Amino acid sequence: MSQCLVHIRFRLGWVHQGNTNIVATYIGIPVFFILYGIWKVVKKTKFIPYSDMDFQTGRSQPPSDEEIAALDELERTDVKLWEELDARGRALKVGRAVHRVFF
């Protein structure tokens, strides 16, 4: 979003200063298509049909019920450890030490 705002403000400032050369503004469009065509010819790549596109390879699978239960148990154990440290009065010291190390 911020890049869009910067681009819009740049273009408005550009026009405000009197730079309205249409050729210089839109020269990138044909250059892009020319370079894209050269790339396709040189590398001999083909367009992939929609039916052959693979959107599943590399996607992560949602966690199973067993994995969720294990994570919940781990979280409860971690909370118990923190409460135990707090009961001993060491939670504040541990928190300060962690803060010094990472921040």
Image (spheres, rainbow, N blue to C red):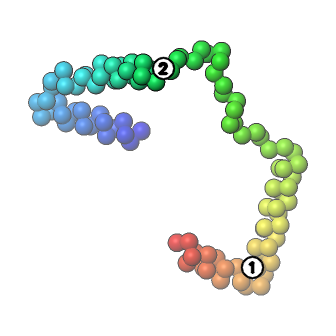
Establish if 57 lies above or below 21: below
Q: Which residue is mark 2?
A: 44
Q: Position of residue 82 (x, y in %)?
A: 76, 73
Residue at image point 24% right, 37% down? 10
Q: Say what amino acid the circle numbered 1 marks.
A: Asp
Residue 11 in the figure: left or right of residue 94: left
Q: Which mark is residue 14?
A: none
Residue 12 in the figure: left or right of residue 63: left
Quick one: label 2 or label 1, which is nearer the N terminus? 2
In which image quadrant can residue 74 be found? bottom right
Establish if 87 lies above or below 62: below
Instruction: State the residue lying farthest toward the left.
Output: 18
Q: Which residue is mark 1?
A: 86
Q: Position of residue 59 (x, y in %)?
A: 69, 36
Residue at image point 69% right, 32% down? 57
Q: Position of residue 93 (x, y in %)?
A: 65, 83
